[in-house]
Image (cartoon, rainbow, N blue to C red):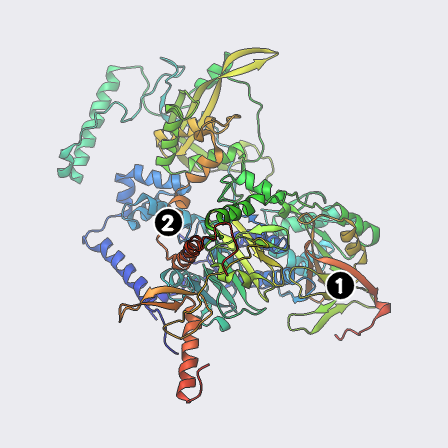
Amino acid sequence: MGYVAVSGGREAIDASLDLLERRRVSSGRSIDVDLIAQVLPELVEQVQSEGSLWCPEVAATAVKQARGSVEEAVFLVRAYRSTLERLYVSRTIDTNDMQVDRRISAAFKDVPGGQVLGSTRDYSHRLIDFGLTEESDVGVRARLVEIEEELSDMADADAGKERGIDAHLPKVLDYLRSLGMVRTVEPDDSQPVDLTKVPLSFPAPRSMILQALSRGLTQAVVAFGYAAIRGFGLSHPTVGELRRGTVPVTIDGPGASAGGPDDAYYLGSLPVCEVESLITCDEEEGGAHRSALDVGYGLVMGSDESKAIAMSVLDHSLRADDVRYPTQDQEFVLTHIDGVEATGFISHLKLPHYVTFQSKLDSALRSVRAHANGEKGGEADA
Amino acid sequence: MRNTYNFAFLDEGSKREIRRAILKGVAIPGYQVPFASREMPIGRGWGTGGLQVTLACIGPADVLKVIDQGADDSVNAVSIRGLVRQTTGVATTSDTRRATLIQSRHRIPETPLTSNQLMVLQVPMPEPLRTYEPRETVTRRLHAEAEYTGAYLELFEQIVRYGTTTTDADHPVMVGGRYVMAPSPIPRFDNPRLEDADNLFLFGAGREKKIYAVPPHTHVASLAFDDFPFVREDFSGKRCHVCGATGVYMTETVDSATGERVWQCSDTDFCARHAAAARAAAEKGGDPR
Amino acid sequence: MSERDVLFPRDDAADARSFYLQKNFRALLDAMARPGELTPLSTSDSEASSCATRAGLLPQTVCVLDVVLDAGTTVRVAGARSDDATCELGERTHALARPLGEAAFCVVPLALAGEDAAAAVRVARAGTLASPHLGATCIVECAALLGTDASGVRVGSRTGSAGYVRWSLAGPGIDGSCELGCDRDDVLAARNARADEFPLGIDLVLVDGAGHIACVPRSTRLTRMGTSGEEVRSWAM
């Protein structure tokens, strides 16, 4: 074999992979995948939400491998997802059946079933607790015993008041619908379109809008939602209901066509956070106009409330008939919130581009020559 | 968790969807067929489209060549070739003549391809009209109506402003007299290789989710005007400092030994073989070819 | 060989299926890229035969359909046994059944001939200007299919004394022009009679009982030459 002009690519890659692995193990400490899932569940949830795959063990392993990089962990989960066969589609999940551990409404002071604050940071004070630097497993277990006692004392004090998980909490929106306040919408049971099987096209069907938002980059969805309510949009929403809890996932038996819910197979439960936002709109009825309420819907796997609320804002915003703001532009929002695509294309700028750059230099030189020869608008360069 | 991998990574359902898109692309030369691009173990924008096309086509009897900027040893080419090999076990080569399937970023090899070779090009932006029309909804309509005035207008504006066209790589082409197509960021130098070729060209854009094709023996013309014909990159007076070749695509670089600026073949396989042939001829005492 | 050259572990049975589908896909791809050229099908799947018998199709047709059909697409077998045959394919491939004018893949069996076959071809969907790829692919069974293979050798088959017509093909994928002999005058004439304006149209996949396929994509200009009675050259088998 003769002379090779440029060599060493293979060796460079091998070395860089070794350096990467060295970084990962240089601390001399390893962390259990289970520990990551138990102690950093919200990080693991974000990876599953953006990875569009619910499997805490896989996501926690990805977080470990990615050394905590959400971008990288989501990439790993999505690539893994690509190798899995898609055998079933679940039965429709009715969030009325949610086992709710937290449910609030900003629209009313109180709602049927009550405002259940649940566990939330909303009213905590964001002060770093430096005591955590000394916390140990023993300390954690002792603290748990302490807290259980406190909560149990509180419950005794409010004897008769229910606490904990509740199923079948009535929906705030059902109450509003009963008053005729919510804009009438024709029920649409058409098959959802899956954007992992059919490429995004515009105008996108509602199922695709919701899917793209739900699996989108958390910070991007929140940023665009923020822009929409801050002025780059028409939405001035009120959170009609936010509910967080677990929903059962069931599938029909093989060969069953339209089997009933009792014949279905229960696969497990999924933690989700659902938001129904209300936006005032104009409704025309028999020639007369009145004010009504439109609904923006948000649902994420896991418990990221900001993402679910932003999603509900954008769901409404992206269905606007008259596009005046970028937050109403489906192509602008939905194309650019996919994490793997965004970071992939941004980072591809690091790849060699010297062949194309040479071509750019050639063109630039030609234009300089053409200008120097005073050939502006004249004959072509040979 | 699973212990075994599918041949060529993708499950058969994914391969089938890609294969259906490829067949339609071949039946409608130059038309971008939408497909549900999967996430791959390499980054979006790093060749996932080309990779999916390769993985859908490759079989145990294939011999694979992967290049980037014309070089087999470029890090991204090494990475992609490694992934395909790990998931298929197929033989790989850097010799263009021995390959049956070539995946490439930004170049078509200098050695003309034959009818039993399949060329897969990686495409970042499949839409040739994107530079003047950002919306996919609009460009789809423009292609449907063969409304390509905008593409010509861009070239016209360059001529008016600079006295010449100033496209660099990815100069748009008209395929089969019907579709304007982005040939991928190959230099203008390589555009003529698409015209009336002996081999099939497949194009994969993973992030943008499009697949398209140019069959062999298809008329492919770079967009130009009668009075301002298509211009390729000019290397007159330059020769490769490694193998002495002229009339091939070269890039300017620095000789690490002398520090001087030199020109070098971008196609490293061509360069190595040309250099070897020149040395063999010199050793025999004959005239170097 | 560095540690990183280790191949990912695979499963032999899954591999066998993968290889069978890949080989036939390449035959289909080569045929579509070089219209009129005959490429060889690999028909080693024995289950394809029993499915074919139940559906009233050639085993070779089922082998072609195995490459392209699954739950992500739609199919219709034209002819008298349409519902049974389509259902049979649906069970094997999970492809969804649709009427002729809507299906992405149509099958014209040997048993369907003449005006009935022409009618099926007329109705197949052409796609739209914005989405021409939606134009149907029609798999057509042939009793006679004669042409040239990749190495320039004349190949093909002819069942019994099936007559055939010589067609001339030109367009993308063809160096100048090429000739194809086929008994499906009914289908090919009907395809031309559709007069679809490119890029709209249907793409034909011609299959014979001996494992050859030839394609006529919508980009091909197809011209009738003569019948087998007007032979100028003989076709060596």
Looking at the image, residue A247 lies above or below residue B98: above
- The reply to the same-chain question for discs 1 and 2 is no
Q: Quadrant of residue C141?
A: bottom right
In this rendering, position of residue B126 left or right of residue B24: left
Q: Kindly tell me whether residue A148 is visible in this rendering.
A: yes
The amino acid marked with disc number 1 is: Ser
> For residue B239, which quarter of the picture?
bottom left
Give the distance between the C-alpha atoms of the residues marked 1 and 2, in whole angstroms: 52 Å
Chain to which mark 1 belongs: C
| Residue A30 in picture, x, y percent from top left | 22, 51
Q: Is residue A146 left or right of residue A102?
A: left
Q: Nearer the viewer, mark 1 or mark 2?
A: 1
Toward the viewer: B118 or B162? B162
Give the total number of marks visible in the rendering.
2
Residue underneath mark 1: C168
Q: Residue A76 — which label? A: 2
Residue at 66% x, 43% y: name it: C128
Please tell me whether residue B235 is drawn above or below residue B205 in the rendered image. below
In the rendered image, residue A109, in percent from the top left (x then y), is placed at: 35, 12
Label 1 neighbour load within 10 Å: few <14, some 14-19, many 20+: some
Q: Is residue C11 visible?
A: no
Q: Nearer the viewer, residue C205 or A6?
A: A6
- Assign a secondary structure to mark 2: helix
Report the residue at 74% width, 65% height from top. Answer: C180
The residue nearer to you, when weighing C180 against A115, is: C180
Mark 2 neighbour class, 10 Å CA radius: few under 14, some 14 to 19, many 20 or more: many
Amino acid carrying label 2: it is Leu
The image shows residue B41 at horizontal and vertical percentages of 40, 53
Percent of width and height locating residue A340? 40, 45
Find residue C145 and report its image quarter. Answer: bottom right
Looking at the image, residue C187 sits to the left or right of residue C2; the answer is right
